[in-house]
Amino acid sequence: MIDRGRTPPGWPRELAPPGSSEFAERVVPWLLDQGPPDLRSSVLRTLPLALVRYLIHYAEGGLNGARRAYGQARVELGPLLTAAEVATAQQGFEAAGARFLQLQRELALVEGALLALAGTNLPAARG
């Protein structure tokens, strides 16, 4: 449960607390910053709940991709790169995965706040 005006642990630093007037004004621009650039011209920009749901799936796909890239790096890149370059690539994949994991957590909180703003008591859908 998210309290209005209080920032829950893990809340995005760039976003005003849930329930505040600034949250309502800034949530869509913040969400648009989290996804691919073409979202800015998508109809989803007018539907915050649909936008956050899309981004939850987007982040899940990014995390899965980063994990797979990390796990397959030696097999796929080993013949093409030095061991040090493969290790560097794996560090990049790991950093990307960490960012997507953080984004998943933030999006779940934002979705909960949007659901509260919409006046629904339904729990946020997962995955």
Image (spheres, rainbow, N blue to C red):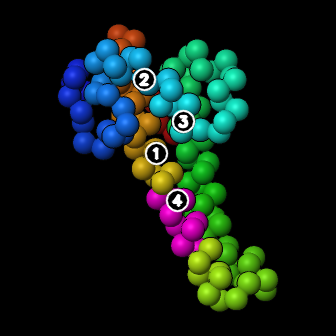
Nearer to us: label 4 or label 2? 2
Whole-angstrom CA distance, mark 4 to mark 2, is 26 Å
For badge 2, the amino acid type reads Arg
Q: Earlier in the sequence, mark 1 or mark 4?
A: 4
- Nearer the observer: mark 3 or 1; the answer is 3
Q: Pointer 2: what residue?
A: 26
Q: Point out residue 85 in the picture as x, y percentages from the top left corner.
A: 65, 82
Crowding at dot 1, Cα within 10 Å, few <14 / some 14-19 / many 20+, comes out as many
Residue 6 included in the magenta stretch of the image: no
Query: Main structural element of the magenta stretch: helix, strand or loop?
Result: helix
The mark nearer the N terminus, 3 or 2, is 2
Q: Residue 63 carries which label?
A: none
**Quadrant hosting residue 27:** top left
Queried whether the magenta region covers residue 92, the answer comes back as yes
In the rendered structure, the answer to whether residue 95 lies left or right of residue 44 reads left
Amino acid carrying label 1: it is Leu
Q: Name the residue under label 1.
A: 103
Cα–Cα span, label 1 and label 2: 17 Å
Q: Which residue is at a point 58% across and 74% down the rendered structure image?
A: 90
Which element carries disc 1, helix, strand or loop? helix
Of mark 4 and mark 2, the one earlier in the sequence is 2
Residue type (three-letter) at the residue carrying disc 4: Gly
Going by the picture, which residue comes out furthest to the top? Answer: 119
Q: Which corner quadrant of the image does residue 76 belong to?
A: bottom right
Per the rendered image, the range of residues in magenta is 90-98
> SS for tag 2?
helix
Q: Residue 33 carries which label?
A: 3
> Distance between the Cα atoms at labels 1 and 4?
10 Å
Q: Residue at x 67, y 75 (%)?
A: 73
Residue, disc 4: 97
**Which is nearer the N-term, disc 3 or disc 4?**
3
